[in-house]
Image: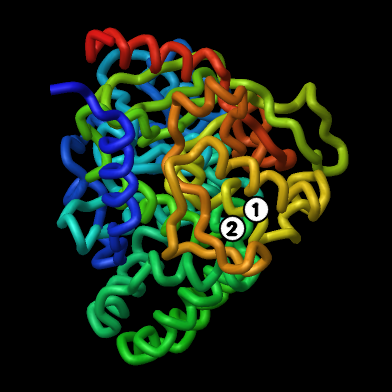
Amino acid sequence: MKLDINAANEKTLEIMKSGQAELVDIKPARDVIPGMTENTILHAGPPIDWSRMCGPMKGAVIGALIYEGRAKDETEAAELAASGEIEYSPCHHHNSVGPMAGIISPSMPVFVLKNKTYGNYAFCTLNEGLGKVLRYGAFSQDVIEKLKWMEKVLAPTLQSALTISGNIDIKGIIAQALHMGDECHNRNKAATSLFIREIAPSLVKVQEKTDVISDVLDFMNGNDHFFLNLSMPAGKAILTPASGIEGSTVVTAMSRNGTDFGIRVSGTGDKWFTAPAPKVEGLYFPGFTDDDANPDIGDSSITETTGYGGFAMAAAPAIVQFVGSTAGDALNFTKKMYEITVGENNSFTIPSLNFRGTPTGIDIRKVLELGILPQINTGIAHIKPGIGQVGAGLVNPPQKIFEDALITFAEDYNL
């Protein structure tokens, strides 16, 4: 039978469009993430070992080992991290995703999302907020104390509320937020507000201590990126069933570990195609320059892979104040992405484009034929661990990974 790539891509797109991501639980990573052991640390991006990790990722690993009680300080943690005792594995290999360094250790609470249509699950940690945080490589005492509060107070309180509210439709919140000025990668103001609106009535029913309710609500309200750690696993839950479709040239993962940028393609299974991670072009916070920037890092480009984030910038013109460029550029970025995708997702629509569905299903053939690379908007991490975010901007994957993917695809299918 002749291989019908277009039909395979349409099938992949339909699976993506029909996926329904819901928040169903919040549990410790060790209890729900497949393959998680006491010696496992998950990270963003394609596979990497300790010796090749960038500064922010090494700092986050050190912080995770201190948080877990496996080490008492930086020196002890670094020795353990390099000893060979710790198993490092990409979040993507465990149905998980994580922003920036993307570190997940066994005790960390994770959101559990279910794709109601296909029955698969995806996982992500809870967002720490801005400033000195683990995902940017910080591991000072106040960072560890916040992580412990999230484990002991925030997560159990939200989980209890979820038992009353029932499952929360995360895909639906993304769709609404796109109509309210978010693109659900670097702008999550509306989506975070919508999530609080969903969970708040149940919060007040499960917690007698008003100070705890106040602290939880203040934490979410003060963190415009809280929803990012829900929009990311929503994308992962939607894309997992779209992986492994025979003959499909649709990208099912774009991810970076601060050293390498990698993609996976539906029709080539679990193979990674990698090249050096590029620098992000954007705006820097006062006092920082390009010399301070680590190369691109994080699993958050799962949003663009699913059809929102940078692909939906036309819905979020205010994002340009954060990542640079102009409102007109935001519109044009989205329009250009229609040229390299299989179709549109009518669940995610853009008011400024007359409610046209977002461009969805990156086709590696179109990327190379047209010379148009996927558009990603993202934060910029300091090259040294512990300093945190130094800016935000725009980035494109290296073209080589699409070339390598298409060559492998052709070899796999004897084309």
CA separation, marks 2 and 1? 6 Å
* Residue at horizontal 18 percent and vertical 52 percent from the top: 120
Query: Position of 31 compared to 323: left or right?
Result: left
Kind of residue at disc 1: Met
Q: Are marks 2 and 1 in contact (CB under 8 Å)?
A: yes
* Residue at the disc numbered 2: 183
Q: Residue furthest right?
A: 287
Locate the N terminus by quadrant.
Answer: top left
- Identify whether 398 is placed above or below 396: above
Residue 155 vs residue 96, the one in the foreground: 96
Q: Position of residue 56 (x, y in %)?
A: 56, 29
Residue 227 vs residue 133, the one in the foreground: 227
> Which quadrant holds residue 271?
top left
Q: Position of residue 69 (x, y in %)?
A: 33, 39
* Residue at horizontal 51 percent and vertical 44 percent from the top: 304
Rendered image: mark on residue 313: 1
Q: Position of residue 333 (x, y in %)?
A: 68, 44
Residue 168 seen in render: yes
Q: Residue furthest left?
A: 1
Query: Position of 382 compared to 18: left or right?
Result: right
Q: Earlier in the sequence, mark 2 or mark 1?
A: 2
